[in-house]
Image (tube, rainbow, N blue to C red):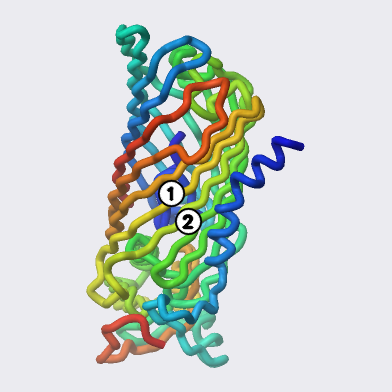
């Protein structure tokens, strides 16, 4: 559900073609809350889900990084006024990101493209959370920064080999999933960088499209706010459905996310 | 076929958004921040690739691609690992890194350029020694 861990110029749900340099680590902690509507498979009225995503990204070499995502989830399913609490760990995700193109055309202007490939694999938890399978995924992301404006566009395909229809809240199988994400970041402060600049505020807007090979697909709008310092970043995001043609899983009602990143 | 058409329609706003944004020669009034363009001569390019050790106490590196504060942390973490480098001050306003040296050994511009490339950026010019007065406001040429 959440974007993979990354470094700079990245919004919450869309990857960027940026990565830590060799020997540098980035730890990213995110908390996402989602409310989903009725589940067509189980008949549940609605579901509230909090996802605690811990991500670690490490620079292996120039333009090459490795990341690991560990998503812990608390889920409350409401059915006929009966609450069913459950908690667990969803599939872990191991991913390589490799920068294949870079054009630094000015002091703060750049255009980059990176390839991504990895696997989501069973966490060892039960099928309520883990897919009990190994699911490869590949993607490509382009990032462009022009002055105060930043753009990211990501295409990612997930070959889902497992997963449970009852516990699919979007892209978690058993159908394959295609994600198309785009984000725009606008630096609201400072107006222009100075020698004393140590941080910057951005407003962000994302469009997140998910298509599953069972023909379910939806488009979400995710406005947010982000602060980037030199060693950390803070991000706040919300997510709203724009269009949903979903029959095999619950529809999303609303999503909220908050996160921090540290580099060292 | 129907599914493919749906996907294209759904992603159209995405394509439109990035298509509008991908023009680097944007000179419209809303482009508040003038791009930082480092003037680089053939001599500068040759100097930036030199493998001869520097002999000064400092150097001013002109770097392209540093678009955000987190970028700055990447570049100073790499430059400080270069043998002979004791201090790094990154100025996003003018796209530079002021590097100070200590000890007997000094790095070459080539080694500094490799560290900058490891950080994910492009070294375009090295000025030695670093000028006493460095411009402090950004967005200029």
Q: Which residue is denoted by mark 1 in the rendering?
A: A6
Residue B27 in the image: x percent, y percent?
Answer: 48, 81
- Residue A27: tell me if it is visible: yes
Find out whether the residues at labels 2 and 1 contact each other: C-beta distance under 8 Å: yes
Q: Residue at horizontal 31%, vertical 52%?
A: A225
Q: Residues within 10 Å of mark 1 (few under 14, many from 20)?
A: many
Q: How crowded is mark 2: few (under 14 residues within 10 Å), some or many (20 or more)?
A: many
Label 2: which secondary element = loop
Relative to A78, residue B2 above or below: below
Count of numbered tags = 2
Residue A237 in the image: x percent, y percent?
Answer: 34, 44
Q: Earlier in the sequence, mark 2 or mark 1?
A: 1
Relative to A168, residue A79 above or below: above
Image quarter of the N terminus of chain B: top right
Relative side of A186 to B120, left or right: left
Which of the chains bears the disc numbered 1? A
Relative side of A200 to A251, left or right: left
Q: Which residue is denoted by mark 2 in the rendering?
A: A18
Q: Distance between the residues labelled 2 and 1?
A: 7 Å
Residue A249 in the image: x percent, y percent?
Answer: 52, 21
Q: In this rendering, do the residues under marks 2 and 1 share a single chain?
A: yes
Residue B132 sits in which quadrant?
bottom left
- Residue B111: tell me if it is visible: no
Label 1: which secondary element = loop
Image quarter of the C terminus of chain B: bottom left
Q: Residue at horizontal 66%, vertical 29%?
A: A213
Relative to A47, residue A221 above or below: below
Q: Residue at horizontal 73%, vertical 36%?
A: B2
Nearer-the-camera pick, A241 or A184: A241
Q: Residue at horizontal 33%, vertical 72%?
A: B85
Residue that lies at the very extreme toward the right in this rendered image:
B1
Which of the chains bears the disc numbered 2? A
């Amino acid at each position: 559900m959440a974007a993979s861990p990354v470094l700079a110029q990245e919004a919450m749900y869309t990857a960027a073609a940026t990565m830590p340099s060799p020997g540098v680590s980035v730890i990213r902690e995110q908390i996402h809350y989602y409310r989903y509507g009725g589940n067509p498979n189980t008949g549940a009225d609605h579901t509230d889900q909090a996802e605690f995503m811990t991500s670690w990204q490490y620079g292996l070499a120039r333009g090459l990084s490795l990341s690991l995502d560990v998503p812990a989830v608390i889920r409350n399913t409401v059915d006929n006024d009966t609450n069913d609490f459950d908690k667990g760990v969803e599939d872990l995700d191991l991913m390589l990101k490799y920068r294949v193109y870079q054009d630094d055309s000015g002091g703060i202007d750049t255009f980059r493209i990176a390839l991504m490939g990895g696997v989501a694999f069973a966490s060892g938890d039960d099928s309520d959370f883990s897919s009990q399978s190994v699911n490869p995924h590949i993607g490509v992301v382009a990032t462009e920064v022009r002055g105060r404006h930043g753009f990211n566009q990501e295409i990612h395909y997930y070959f889902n080999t497992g997963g449970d229809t009852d516990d699919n809240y979007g892209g978690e199988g058993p159908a394959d999933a295609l994600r198309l994400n785009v984000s725009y970041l606008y630096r609201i402060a400072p107006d222009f960088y100075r020698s004393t600049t140590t941080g910057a505020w951005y407003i962000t807007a994302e469009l997140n499209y998910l298509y599953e090979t069972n023909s379910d697909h939806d488009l979400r709008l995710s406005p947010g706010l982000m602060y980037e310092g030199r060693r950390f970043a803070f991000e706040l995001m919300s997510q709203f459905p724009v269009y949903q043609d979903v029959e095999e899983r619950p529809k999303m009602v609303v999503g909220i996310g908050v996160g921090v990143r540290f580099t060292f | 076929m129907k599914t493919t058409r749906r996907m294209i329609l759904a992603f159209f706003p995405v394509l439109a958004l990035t298509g509008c944004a991908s023009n680097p020669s944007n000179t419209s009034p809303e482009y508040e921040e003038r791009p930082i363009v480092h003037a680089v001569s053939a001599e500068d390019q040759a100097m930036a690739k030199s493998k001869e050790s520097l002999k000064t106490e400092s150097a001013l590196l002109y770097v392209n691609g540093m678009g955000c504060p987190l970028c700055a942390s990447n570049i100073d973490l790499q430059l400080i690992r270069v043998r002979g480098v004791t201090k790094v001050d990154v100025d996003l306003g003018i796209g530079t890194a002021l590097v100070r040296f200590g000890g007997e050994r000094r790095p070459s511009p080539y080694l500094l350029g490799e560290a900058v490339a490891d950080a994910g950026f492009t070294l375009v010019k090295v000025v030695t020694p670093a000028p006493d007065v460095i411009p402090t406001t950004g967005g200029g040429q």
